[in-house]
Amino acid sequence: MESEIIQIKTDRVEKTRIHEVDFNNIPFGREFSDHMFMADYKNGKWCDFRIEQYRPIEYKPAMLGLHYGQTIFEGMKAYRNIDGEIMMFRPTDNFERLNRSAIRMCMPTIPVDLMMEALRELIRIDSEWVPKDTESALYIRPFMFATDEFLGVKPSETYRCIMFTGPVGPYYKTPLKVMVEEHYTRAPKGGTGSAKAGGNYGGALYPTKLAQEKGYHQILWTDSFEHKYIEESGTMNVMFQIGETLVTPPTGDTILQGITRDSVLRLATDMGIAVEERRISIDEIKLEHGRGQLNDAFGVGTAATIAPIELIGYRGEDMVLPSIDGRVLSKKIADGLKAIRYGEVADPYGWMVSMN
């Protein structure tokens, strides 16, 4: 996609809000840094690149993105390693996935090099917002939406891309209780499940609410055709340890190609852990639990990284998994990822990118 010569205008705030934040108690997704990046797409190209104060934005009621769901987003994190250097975990992979989502949603792609330059500048300006402890990070949210004023159902001709940041603590503070969903569907075959499109998440809110009213934190989604095969857990990819093998559903047009998922599988393989990407039925999960072979289950994603699952609800009964404290495999993987992110060990994969 054609873009103008990259020249980012910067309008910095006169007074930072950082002193209003308690960095010892950071809720997830409630605190936002001083600045944001913005760019507009019009006349077939991206233009007007700027960094300005994080602030409210105003749009007219007929804006197409508010009506027909042409909205996509990404999520990534910046960390401060043991040497104080600000590092990102696989950021170009996130921007490439943003572009895959754009294609699926009939939106323009945006150059990865442009987004990386904007991200570097944004983090440089707001570098003090990157937490210094290893339980927190700076979350980065790039998103894109349609901006045409038109009530006909068609792709917009204009778009806006915004990227903002904010310090975050853990996404989940306790192990998860999940419920197998056999009626509602996250994404059908041929749908938008492989894209990070806003509608995927909006449509999941009601069935998740129903599960939470029953005492669960999240849903364990099943396929839309038979409601038999496991797909994702809430907003995360999901993995199971059956015996000594790590098993996870294969990605496709109903399951997001998670970057944390890919990292976990590569790390596990190099640790000598047997890995299988294949369909997993809820009947198999129930059978292996009954045999005492369901040794671990956890969600994986940018926000949560590794989120242990303590029980799985299925048709009114709860399958309680082994104690979190006694699990070896997921802890080994989580510790391995954390050591790479914070520079405690060498990064043999080239995942970490310096933002200094």
Image (spheres, grey):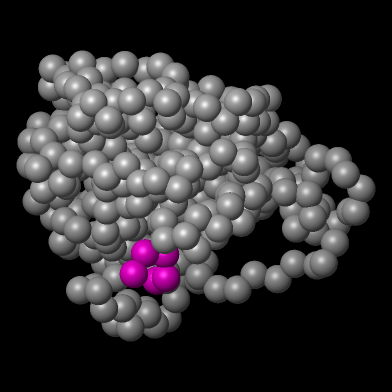
| Residue depicted at x 17% and y 47% | 324
- Is any atom of residue 261 visible in this view? no
Q: Which residues are magenta?
A: 27-31
Q: Taking 284 as reference, is 317 above or below it?
A: below
* Residue 346: % across, % down: 10, 32
Q: In the visual, does 20 lie left or right of 93? A: left
* Residue 7: % across, % down: 53, 49
| Residue depicted at x 34% and y 58% | 171
View extreme (right): residue: 152
Residue 348, quarter of picture: top left
Q: Quadrant of the N terminus?
A: top right
In terms of secondary structure, what is the magenta stretch mainly? loop
Closer-to-camera residue (252/146): 252
Question: Magenta segment: does it hold 67?
Answer: no
Q: Taking 238 as reference, is 123 above or below it?
A: below
- Is any atom of residue 219 visible in this view? yes
* Residue 188: % across, % down: 65, 31
| Residue depicted at x 15% and y 32% | 329
Residue 116, quarter of picture: top left
Residue 206, quarter of picture: bottom right
| Residue depicted at x 17% and y 62% | 132
Question: Magenta segment: does it hold 30?
Answer: yes
